[in-house]
Image (cartoon, grey):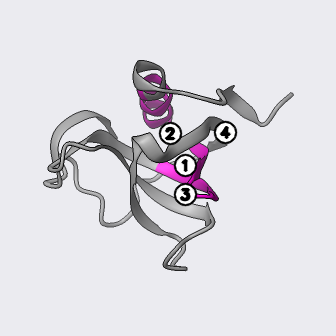
Amino acid sequence: MSAFLFDLKSTTGQVMYEIICRSIANRKRLQFKYEFDTKIVEPHTLGMDKEEHEVLLAYQIAGGSQNGELPGWELFELDKIQDIKIIAETFSTVRPGFRRGDSRMIEIYCEL
């Protein structure tokens, strides 16, 4: 059996929202490519930021990091995410520093 529960090479719009919201609801980690690096994250919030970018707030636990600080919180723009996969690994706790209704978001589609 594959380690990936859901795998699409190219996702846009509603399909990506469904993947991310399903991952949040089931507390499943995500893997995706973002600006040339593969990331593994624990997704917490999907929404729109104040600049009207659709974004994923996630706790990155593995993969490439531009600032070299892992694990840690990252805000990922959806239009830069490629090859997104829900992986079989789950997470059980909300990471420290998470706030429901994050003030950086003007609209929240789904969150823990």
The amino acid sitting under disc 3 is Glu
**N-terminal-most mark, 4 or 2:** 2
**Mark 1: few, some, or many residues within 10 Å (few <14, many ≥20)?**
some
User: Residue 95 appears in which quarter of the rendering?
Assistant: bottom left
From the image, tell me which residue sits under label 2.
27
The amino acid sitting under disc 1 is Phe
Residue range (magenta): 17-42
Q: Are marks 4 and 2 in contact (CB under 8 Å)?
A: no
Front residue (pair 57, 55): 55
Q: CA distance from mark 4 to mark 3?
A: 20 Å
**N-terminal-most mark, 1 or 3:** 3
From the image, tell me which residue sits under label 1.
91
| Residue 34: image location, x then y, percent | 55, 53
The amino acid sitting under disc 4 is Ile
- Give the label on residue 87, or none: 4
User: Tag 1, which secondary structure?
Assistant: loop
Looking at the image, residue 21 sits to the left or right of residue 88; the answer is left
| Residue 97: image location, x then y, percent | 30, 66
- Give the label on residue 35, or none: 3
